Amino acid sequence: MIINYPNGKKYIQSQSTNPSPEEKIKKQKNTAYSNRGMTLEEDLNETNSYYLDRKIAVIHKKPTPVQIVNVDYPRRSAAVIKEAYFKQASTTDYNGVYKGMYIDFEAKETKFSTSFPLKNFHEHQIVHMKAVLDQNGICFVILRFSTEEEVYLLEASHLLSFWERMINGGRKSITKEEITEFGYRIPLGLHPRIDYIKVIDYLYKLS
């Protein structure tokens, strides 16, 4: 049993040298269509592979912790895992480094169109994000409204404020209006699919 960092699909450059305008349009339509239905995780893995291949940033999805409960040893040199289960992750989904800065973020999506439920987050993730901010790390969440295919980057500091509001008896979700006000929409592209580094450059003046 092997656990690896998930890796997105690599883009393979077309062998065609000078495609006609009609071929370009057809290719764009086909590529856009093929990306429909991809999960947020798949899009981010593809984006992170793009960053890594071009030496832009090193960001990986953290492997989900696994608890092994039963191992068979058919031979002295081999072990076979018979039973295991996924443990709840204690931090966020992604982390890495960009231009010397530590980056840490969580990715969530919802089918709701007017708000984002805070129950999608766990308290230990909130605690972790606060700890990252306390160390001056770059921490945020990437939120996708799957029905509208809209993706936003919301800084962790704002998420913590909305979480605190809920703890104090306020609403249990973030409204779409609040996300558009405090967050940054990331247009969906081809390569990379979700170019969140551009938002980081803007926020932290790293470009």
Image: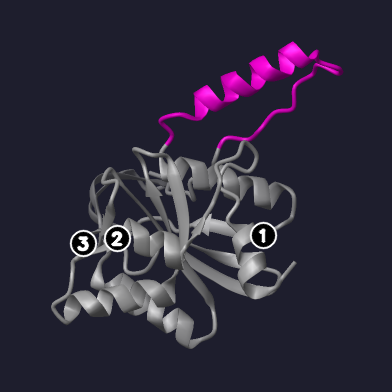
The first of marks 3 and 2 along the sequence is: 3
Given the image, on which type of amino acid does mark 1 rest? Ala
Above or below, comparing residue 62 to residue 45 in the picture:
below
Instruction: Return the residue at label 1.
Output: 57
Q: Which residues make up the magenta segment?
A: 9-38
User: Which mark is nearer the camera, 1 or 3?
Assistant: 3
Residue furthest to the right in view is 18
Give the label on residue 175, or none. Answer: 2
| Left or right: where 126 falls relative to 6 | left
Residue drawn at x 70%, y 28% as measured from the top left: 12
Across and down, in percent, residue 66 comes to: 30, 56
The first of marks 2 and 1 along the sequence is: 1
Across and down, in percent, residue 4 comes to: 47, 49
Q: Which secondary structure lies at badge 3?
A: helix
Above or below, comparing residue 149 to residue 186 in the picture:
above
Residue drawn at x 34%, y 56% as measured from the top left: 176
